[in-house]
Amino acid sequence: MSRLLPLFLLLGLFALPVQAETLLIEAIEQAPSNDSQGLLRPRRGERMATVETRFGRPDGVMGPIGEPPISRWDYPGFSVFFEHDTVINTVVQR
């Protein structure tokens, strides 16, 4: 039995990425559209100043952390991720 334990652990590690990819695809499909009928939010490539002008001051600010510096601004319903001062992604909160 003790010889089989490492094999079971190894097989369990290979199953994890498959489950994560499935969850990500489901989350993307369920996200509201980025327009007035869904949840309007910043788009990739916008600058911090533009985001603040359009959406106001964020409820929370995290970072910058790492190299390149990544920051997060939290708004009601979504979070915006910046590299330096450029939007790299917007995530709908659940």
Image (cartoon, rainbow, N blue to C red):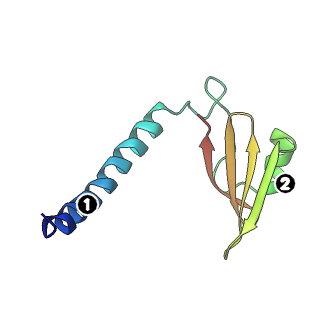
Residue 33 position by quadrant: top right
- Above or below 10: residue 37: above
| 17 vs 90: above or below | below
Q: Where is residue 74 in the image (x, y as percent from the top left)?
A: 74, 45
Earlier residue among tags 1 and 2:
1
Left or right, 60 with reference to 13: right
Tell me if mark 2 has few (under 14), some (14-19) or many (20+) residues whose alpha carbon lies within 10 angstroms of its own. Answer: few
Find numbered disc 1 in the image and state the secondary structure of the residue it sits on. Answer: helix
Q: Which residue is painted at 19% across and 60% down in the image? A: 8
Q: Nearer the viewer, mark 1 or mark 2?
A: 1
Q: In which quarter of the image is the C terminus?
A: top right
Q: In this view, does 13 lie to the left or right of 40?
A: left
Q: Which mark is residue 49?
A: 2
The spot of residue 38 in percent (x, y) is: 61, 26
Determine the residue positioned at 32% across, 54% down.
16
Nearest the viewer among 13 and 91 is 13
Q: Which amino acid does label 1 sit on?
A: Phe
What residue lies at 76% left-to-right and 63% top-to-bottom? 63
Helix, strand or loop status at disc 2: helix
Residue at mark 1 to residue at mark 2: CA–CA distance: 43 Å
Q: Residue furthest front?
A: 1
Q: Identify residue type, mark 2.
A: Ala
Front residue of this view, candidates 73 and 40: 73
Residue with the mark numbered 1: 14
